Amino acid sequence: MSEELADFGEFVQASLPGLLRYGHALTGNPHDAADLVQTVLEKIGSRWTHVQRKAADPLAYVRRAMANAHISRWRRLKRESLVADLPEQRTAEPVDPFEHEPLWQALRELPPRQRAVIVLRYYEGLSEAEIASSLGVSTGTVKSQASKAISTLRSKIGSISGGRDDW
């Protein structure tokens, strides 16, 4: 039993930075990302041996669970309000190197479904059919949401870069 826990602990230690970055891309801010990662790892940790037996790639399994948990959350809430700053900052937190990155800012401003489609397509590398299955929508919806999101990203990045369209 302790060896199984050690394996899970090693997995978490090795993959936590990447999972936090992935969560940040999904949620749009580091605080919700940390909550998402914690919630998913808490659920998966209790059945780690089952996950290791059934999943060919446990990291992919955890990422998929994170995407599903995030999608379930915004389906319940239906509305998301992202804020750039916390209301009260008592300690100096490390500066996020991507905070002022134009693409990151434009991605954060996308509606939750469009952001989820873009993250699942270009970060996770899923096909349109896999995204549709994961989000519970049709493939056509995935295509239209991706098209709208890319169009929005192009216009926002284009206005920042002085109208150059290098995409």
Image (cartoon, helix red, strand yellow):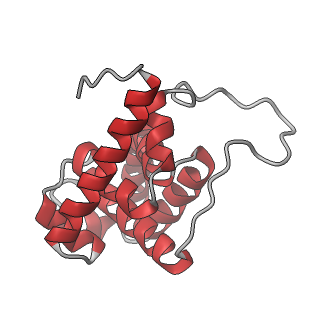
Q: Is residue 161 above or below residue 34?
A: above
Q: Is residue 93 left or right of residue 14?
A: right
The image quadrant of residue 114 is: bottom left
Q: Position of residue 119 (x, y in %)?
A: 32, 49
Q: Is residue 58 visible?
A: no
> Is 73 in front, or is 159?
159
**The N terminus appears in which quarter of the rendering?**
bottom left
The image quadrant of residue 84 is: top right
Q: Is residue 129 above or below residue 14?
A: below
Residue at position x 30%, y 61% in the image: 64
The image quadrant of residue 151 is: top left
> Is 119 in front, or is 152?
152
**The C terminus appears in which quarter of the rendering?**
top left
Q: Position of residue 16 (x, y in %)?
A: 45, 43
Q: Is residue 93 visible?
A: yes
Q: Position of residue 122 (x, y in %)?
A: 24, 44
> Is 59 in front, or is 119?
119
Q: Is residue 72 above or below residue 11?
A: below
Q: Is residue 73 left or right of residue 135?
A: right
Q: Position of residue 83 (x, y in %)?
A: 67, 49
How many marks can you see? 0
Residue at position x 44%, y 61% in the image: 112
Q: Is residue 11 above or below residue 134?
A: above
